[in-house]
Image (spheres, rainbow, N blue to C red):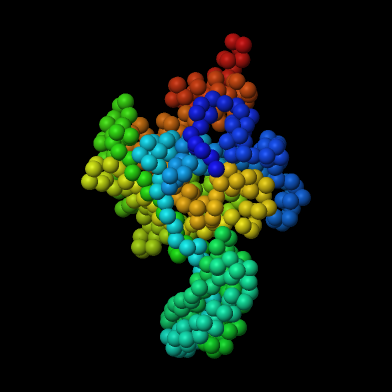
Amino acid sequence: MVADSRLPNFRALTPAQRRDFLADACGLSDAERALLAAPGALPLALADGMIENVFGSFELPLGVAGNFRVNGRDVLVPMAVEEPSVVAAASYMAKLAREDGGFQTSSTLPLMRAQVQVLGVTDPHGARLAVLQARAQIIERANSRDKVLIGLGGGCKDIEVHVFPDTPRGPMLVVHLIVDVRDAMGANTVNTMAESVAPLVEKITGGSVRLRILSNLADLRLARARVRLTPQTLATQDRSGEEIIEGVLDAYTFAAIDPYRAATHNKGIMNGIDPVIVATGNDWRAVEAGAHAYASRSGSYTSLTRWEKDAGGALVGSIELPMPVGLVGGATKTHPLARLALKIMDLQSAQQLGEIAAAVGLAQNLGALRALATEGIQRGHMALHARNIALVAGATGDEVDAVARQLAAEHDVRTDRALEVLAALRARA
């Protein structure tokens, strides 16, 4: 367990020094230290077993967000992402939040849905009641396929039956299996259960089963995070905390009422969540799909977060979204760096991982809203993006920081300007 998630002077360290710091803080073994140090942590033979037609592996920068305090516990958050400013923004917002107690989180049970589509039923409402009458039999059949999950306290817990009486393909019945998947993401488990109950459902309804597959709208598997920041915490040299809070509320309201703004607003939230999901070997596409569908549950696409001002004048932010993530199975077990990321986070359950990811998404959203409400989104982002531009221009070693500093100071982050700055730097040298 990490005693302190603050990373003093971390940015000033070299990658090797940062790695040593993390290894000491998280109690990593010599083998794990070596895994972080060497490129190509995913052996080609292992990659070849993960997907088809493998010819190599693709690496992303792996960073760590500091300062996070979640439910009174310090946590370091590994993030795999290519976009500048994401890790920095999350870490800085976590630093501010920490002054007011950090993030409070909660989650529901890890319940996933499997859908069994039934066609060819002329009495769909009657068939629905017949399926519900056979609830115990269907649950028993589903649970016969995974004794290990049952032994862990999971398994199919209930069913739902949805009727679509008038579709272009005729009346349709959809049976949902509600499955507690414990610490797994659960896709393979619920798909197998759906396959197993299909013949029984056909017998009960007299219809024909077509699709048997999970739903990525995991609206029974939610993660939530909340943060409260006082005006004193948010204040800067140029602006009062009260002014910043009003700006954040204005920016949030824009996203709440306008789907065009909400799409960008929620993309910023996923800027924080996705890198955590990727770093831990989870299915970021499933999390994205569920999040955006959940944002539309009212019939209109809107913000995943909510921002308010409490009676004391403090800014209160909250987020709730589906979080189908696991600690077992898939790449979380096969990818060496995914296992290491989970160790760094010192997790006890998949629900805890989902809660931390939600907290990071809330922090990322606050960073974007705060920037939009003050100096604008580009100032901080482009300063960090300048390093990328310096690399594109051909800078190496100490040249990278020197070129980036000048581009940022000039507020002119362009490749052609980087080439000019680099040429002048080399001429002086």
Q: Against 35, is 342 above or below?
A: below
Determine whether, in the image, residue 264 is placed left or right of residue 405.
Answer: left
Determine whether, in the image, residue 6 is placed left or right of residue 252.
Answer: right
Estimate the x, y position of residue 194 in percent, counting from the top left. Answer: 58, 74
Q: Against 65, is 141 above or below?
A: below
Estimate the x, y position of residue 56 in percent, counting from the top left. Answer: 73, 46
Q: Residue at x 58, y 43 (%)?
A: 344
Estimate the x, y position of residue 398 in percent, counting from the top left. Answer: 60, 20
Which image quadrant is residue 275 in? top right
- Outermost residue, top side: 428
Which image quadrant is residue 235 in? top left
Give the total of numbered labels: 0
Q: Residue at x 49, y 75 (%)?
A: 158
Q: Residue at x 57, y 88 (%)?
A: 203
Along the viewing direction, whichever of 362 and 168 lies nearer the viewer: 362
User: Is residue 104 visible in the rendered structure shown here?
Assistant: yes
Estimate the x, y position of residue 101 in percent, counting from the top left. Answer: 38, 41
Q: Residue at x 70, y 37 (%)?
A: 30
Q: Against 277, is 135 above or below?
A: below
Quadrant of the frame with the C terminus: top right
Along the viewing direction, whichever of 272 and 223 lies nearer the viewer: 223
Quadrant of the frame with the N terminus: top right
Along the viewing direction, whichever of 231 and 117 lies nearer the viewer: 231
Which image quadrant is residue 163 in? bottom left
User: Is residue 114 visible in the rendered structure shown here?
Assistant: no
- Outermost residue, left side: 311
Along the viewing direction, whichever of 229 and 364 lies nearer the viewer: 229
Determine whether, in the image, residue 57 is placed left or right of residue 140.
Answer: right
